[in-house]
Amino acid sequence: MLGTFAVGKTSLVRRYVQGIFSDKYLTTMGAKVDKKIVDFEGKSINLMLWDLNGEDRFQGLSMNYVRGTAGYLLVIDSTRRSSFEAAHLLQQKVEQELGPLPFIVVFNKTDLKTPWENQDREIRQLEESGWTIMYTSAKTGTGVEEVFETLTQMIMNA
């Protein structure tokens, strides 16, 4: 789980693993690891979900946390353009350090309807460049299962 602060990484993991949502904001310090066992094509797969602290400029993101990862979710707050811009930089940094890995750009907080100017055009450009884009709301649960299932499938088929 990568993205700037307050995009909903922890809320997405909690919704997926525990089925709950809380309005209380707790800053993740360092990394929090959760585990979920899922069935994929008749096999039990252990997903280790690393929820990393969000940093605006990502200078503090330790590549030690992401080494060995099989794939990642790049989470964006659908109401904050700054989180979109920061996601580009983070994706470039991860790819530069680790090479190409399966990832999904997740526009979270879709239950809140305040998109930024040119959002549709910029999202279309990402899709045209080959990025997988999905939409979620940790609050309502919309799209949460699907995004983790899709990433699991991408990892298993890589």
Image (cartoon, rainbow, N blue to C red):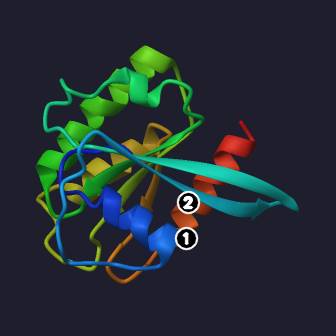
Residue 135 seen by the camera: no
Specify few, some or many for label 1: CA neighbours under 10 Å numbering under 14, 14-19, or 20 or more.
Answer: some
Residue 14 picture quarter: bottom left
Residue 105, image x, y percentages: 40, 49
Residue 1, image x, y percentages: 40, 47
Residue at 31%, 24% in the rendered image: 62
Residue 142 seen by the camera: yes
19 to 80, vertically: above or below:
below
Residue 134, image x, y percentages: 45, 60
Question: Residue 17 versus residue 102: which sits nearer the camera?
Answer: 17
Residue 101, image x, y percentages: 55, 31
Q: Quadrant of the C terminus?
A: top right
SS label for mark 2: helix
Viewed as shown, does residue 132 lie left or right of 107?
A: right
- Evaluate if marks 1 and 2 touch, with contact meaning CB atoms under 8 Å apart: yes
Viewed as shown, does residue 153 lie left or right of 92?
A: right
| Extreme-top residue of the structure | 97
Question: Residue 10 versus residue 146: which sits nearer the camera?
Answer: 10
Q: Which residue is mark 2?
A: 148
What type is the residue that disc 1 sits on? Glu
Question: Residue 142 versus residue 43: which sits nearer the camera?
Answer: 43
What type is the residue that disc 2 sits on? Phe
Viewed as shown, does residue 82 lie left or right of 121?
A: left
Question: Residue 115 versus residue 19: which sits nearer the camera?
Answer: 19
- Count up the numbered dots: 2
Residue at 37%, 22% in the rendered image: 63
Residue at 23%, 62% in the rendered image: 78
User: Between marks 1 and 2, how big is the CA–CA gap?
Assistant: 5 Å
2 to 123, vertically: above or below:
above
Q: Which residue is mark 1?
A: 145
137 to 157, vertically: above or below:
below
